[in-house]
Image (cartoon, rainbow, N blue to C red):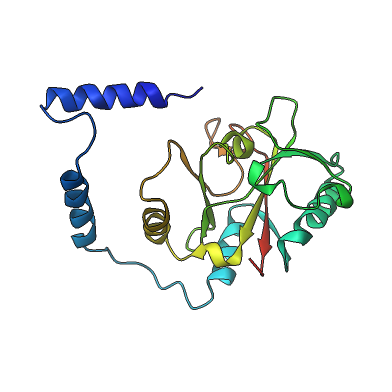
Amino acid sequence: MDTSAARAAIFSRIRAAQSRPSQPTPAELEQVRQYLGSHAAGPRPDLGADLVARFRQQAERTSQTLDTVQSLDEVPAATARYLAGLGLPKQAIAWQTLAGLPWQPAGLAVEFRKPVNEDLVGVTGCFCAVAETGTLMLLSGPDTFSSAALLPETHIAIVPVSRIVGSIEDAFALAKAERGELPRATNFISGPSRTGDIEQTIVLGAHGPYRVHVILVNGA
């Protein structure tokens, strides 16, 4: 359900109560930019020079599996191998942004739509990945729907190595530089869904995917 109109109406009422225009003025936006730009960054750990190696290490610590290919065109074949290794059907839903990849020659039936309950595999890209924590940052949009990473039991994420940043702070800075504002939904994914609510026993897949598989793309 799209709640953008309701969100806009709420903010408009708040601004009206403050005797301000319904939309932020250029002066207000510039004031925010100046404040953010002058805010001192806190201390950060030394992540080393190899962010890809750090991301792999942290992703594996959070129960993600990883594969590496050299180009985006190799992603469908890597996806097919992964699904075959688990004995899963070679079918999935995926983001619209991935429609140009050679899925059919790899023997996969991929539909580019939002998932329904019966869909077992969702394939997404990511806005960027965070080396410090092995985390994927996904930004929602008409062609990059959040549900593809949240509803299916298996989430396969395509991560260009050029989009691996050091820290969460770097991820937000990149989003601000490239997008200006964050979309309606921003998801940070660090491995499969898990909970320890019952007797502090960790259970995977309680509130989302049982598996998160990352395909790193060296040439992208």
Q: Residue at x 41, y 73 (%)?
A: 46
Q: Nearer the viewer, residue 65 or 203?
A: 65
Q: What residue appears at the point 20 percent right and 25 percent down from the top-left corner?
A: 14
Which image quarter is the C terminus in? bottom right
Q: Image quarter for residue 33?
A: bottom left
Q: Is residue 43 above or below residue 154?
A: below
Residue occupying image coordinates x 28% and y 22%: 10
- Seen in the picture, residue 56 relative to 211 is either above or below; the reply is below
Q: Quadrant of residue 40?
A: bottom left
Residue nearest the observer in this picture, 218 or 27: 27
Farthest residue, direction bottom: 49
Residue in view at x 68 percent, y 33 percent: 113
How far across and how far down the image is residue 194, in percent? 58, 39
Say left or right for 124 vs 176: right
Residue 122 locus on image (x, y percent): 69, 40
Residue 198, horizontal then vertical, whole percent = 55, 30
* Residue farthest toward the left in the current orientation of the protein: 19
Q: Nearer the viewer, residue 26 or 89?
A: 26
**99 displayed left or right of 148:** right
